[in-house]
Image: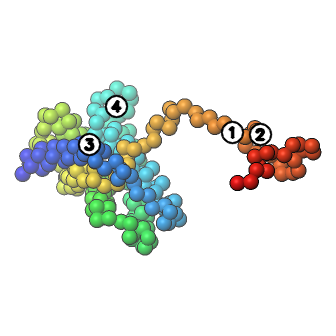
Amino acid sequence: MQILLWVALPYMCGAIFIVGHIWRYRYDKFGWTTRSSQTYENRLLRWGSPMFHFGILMVIAGHAVGLFIPREWLYAIGISEEIYHLGATVLGTFAAVLTLAGLAILIFRRRTVPAVFLATTVMDKIMYVLLGATLLFGTAATVVHQVFGPGFHYRETISPWIREALIFRPRPELMVDVPLLFQLHVLTACILFALWPFTRLVHVFSAPVGYLFRPYIVYRSRDDHRGSQSPKRGWDPVGAAPDPARLRRP
């Protein structure tokens, strides 16, 4: 069971994540979109979307530091274990609450606004369930073990397990004694990654970064006047000869 959960399942989900994105980009480019529903409703979206996106960016940044950067590297730049756990707990809890609040608003909007609900697919519903479960398990693990509990040193278990798996040296024994909430958080995240290429989450890889580096587009008018303002209306100049083309009958 340990081999299945902490070796086979993560590698299978990672393979589906990579191959699925390649397949989707090659055969479903027109479907590579968020299917935005802003035209249906904007009031709730204006609050829920920024909260969710800013919160999830903070969550991703925190996971990247905690999981992929060895603690010895942080010690080298003066970040001790106490400072790291304090920042990770406070900022992580704030980011989780912000993300969950934004997600709750988005789900409420999608369920209560008829036009948005009709535009919701089955895959959207499955994605929301898995995304919400992953966030809830991660938040619960932080609150139970880090805020109100004695603290769990995931950088000695989960972090090296992920780093070793990335270089194809799996060590499932590192996950055996991990608390259940953290295990559920990791497992639901793996399943979410496997589902990712087949949902609207693909828009994460469509960020318009090229707009920051593209050259300016210069627009020039072909009219006689210059600038963006049109000439004022008035009489034609006195003595001007009529245009023969306008006098010619069709």
Q: Residue furthest front?
A: 249
Up/down of 250 relative to 119, above or below = above
151 or 183, nearer to the observer? 183
168 sits left or right of 211 in the view: left
CA–CA distance in space, label 2 to label 3: 51 Å
Kind of element beneath mark 4 = helix
Q: Which residue is drawn at 18% across and 32% down?
A: 167
Q: Residue at x 76, y 38 (%)?
A: 224
The numbered mark, 4 or 2, whose residue comes first in the sequence reads 4
CA–CA distance in space, label 2 to label 1: 8 Å
Residue on which disc 1 sits = 221
The numbered mark, 3 or 4, whose residue comes first in the sequence reads 3
53 sits left or right of 144 in the view: right
Q: Residue furthest top?
A: 76
* Snapshot quadrant of residue 229: top right
Residue on which disc 4 sits = 74
Q: Are marks 2 and 1 in contact (CB under 8 Å)?
A: yes
Residue on which disc 3 sits = 22
Residue 82 image point, x, y percent: 35, 39
Q: Residue at x 28, y 65 (%)?
A: 122
The numbered mark, 4 or 1, whose residue comes first in the sequence reads 4
